[in-house]
Image (cartoon, helix red, strand yellow):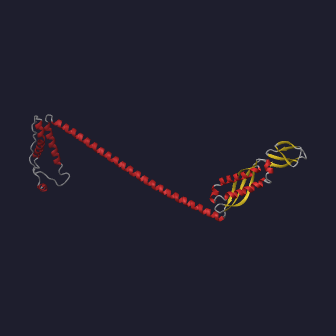
Amino acid sequence: MNTVVLFVPQQEAWVVERMGRFHRILEPGLNFLIPLLDRIRYVQSLKEIVINVPEQSAVTLDNVTLQIDGVLYLRIMDPYKASYGVEDPEYAVTQLAQTTMRSELGKISLDKVFRERESLNACIVDAINQASDCWGIRCLRYEIKDIHVPPRVKESMQMQVEAERRKRATVLESEGTRESAINVAEGQKQAQILASEAEKAEQINKAAGEANAMLAKAKAKAEAIRLLADALTQQNGNAAASLAVAEQYVSAFSKLAKDSNTILLPSNTGDVTSMVTQALGIYGALTKPHAAKSPEVTPPALEVPKCPPTELPEADQVNSS
């Protein structure tokens, strides 16, 4: 009502005309008017306005008809332009949003509609702002709510999705089989390498051990020979060596018939004295060159008591023959 004193609410703009002509816009708070001359012609809300865009049909680039609806968020930035620039701002913006959405959907295919919804919303907002700038209205956001696809197209899309999933499953299975085969082959390769290295190390260690054992035996044998040679150079050394040879000969002769039933015996088996004399003769033949180089006092010959010759039974003689 046109009164003298007016209180304008916050976030509202009242357009005042004086004698049918635009006079001023009342700010929120206390304001004064002249009755009969001033008149409140328009009341504009400066809050953000939400407008439902009705469902409409649109054809994509690949000739698929879609049913799409959306939500439009806008705000009046200039109350003067919103009052005098367009008759019904909300209706004008709604119609502009519908036509812009149909135009933008005709530029892309069906697959891109679902993948590029954000870019599609941004394009619609830019197109609306370019056209509504002269109306004093600014579009803040545009969101597509629902996209309805024809039943047959929807079935085709479902089959395509299932085929794509089967393809991915087959590819993943083949890749898993390939990775498994590669891992198994790599494991076998590493196992063979490790086994060959282990065998090589074992052979090296075995050869080193055998070499060390042979060297140790050779050193021990050399040390024994050296000690034996030193012992033989002492007084009565030859006599002691003769006694040792005679004992070993008799001991070896006593073991002849233990491992086998068939043995070879000398003709003078019962004459132990002759056998000992033969052994001493072999030792004396081996020690003559050494004695010729280093003459020493020869000890008296070892006298071995002569035993009476023993006669074998007739059965033993037959076996020996």
Determine whether, in the image, residue 48 is placed left or right of residue 117.
Answer: right
Instruction: For the C terminus, give its image quadrant.
Output: bottom left
Does residue 45 appear in this view?
no
Determine whether, in the image, residue 127 is placed left or right of residue 285.
Answer: right
Give the residue at x 26% y 41%.
Answer: 215
Q: Quadrant of residue 68?
A: bottom right
Is 95 in front, or is 198? Answer: 95
Is 190 in front, or is 223? Answer: 190
- In the rendered image, the vertical position of residue 51 relative to residue 222, given as above or below: below
Q: Quadrant of residue 87?
A: bottom right
Determine whether, in the image, residue 272 is placed left or right of residue 203.
Answer: left
Give the residue at x 17% y 47%.
Answer: 252
Does residue 54 appear in this view?
yes
Is 29 in front, or is 40? Answer: 40
Q: Position of residue 89 (x, y in %)?
A: 78, 53
Determine whether, in the image, residue 240 is placed left or right of residue 28.
Answer: left
What is the residue that sits farthest to the bottom in this orientation? Answer: 152
Q: Position of residue 139 (x, y in %)?
A: 73, 50
- In the rendered image, the vertical position of residue 225 relative to residue 21, given as above or below: above
Q: How many marks?
A: 0
Q: Position of residue 56 (x, y in %)?
A: 72, 60
Is 157 in front, or is 196? Answer: 157
Q: Position of residue 297 (x, y in %)?
A: 10, 34
Give the residue at x 47% y 56%.
Answer: 178
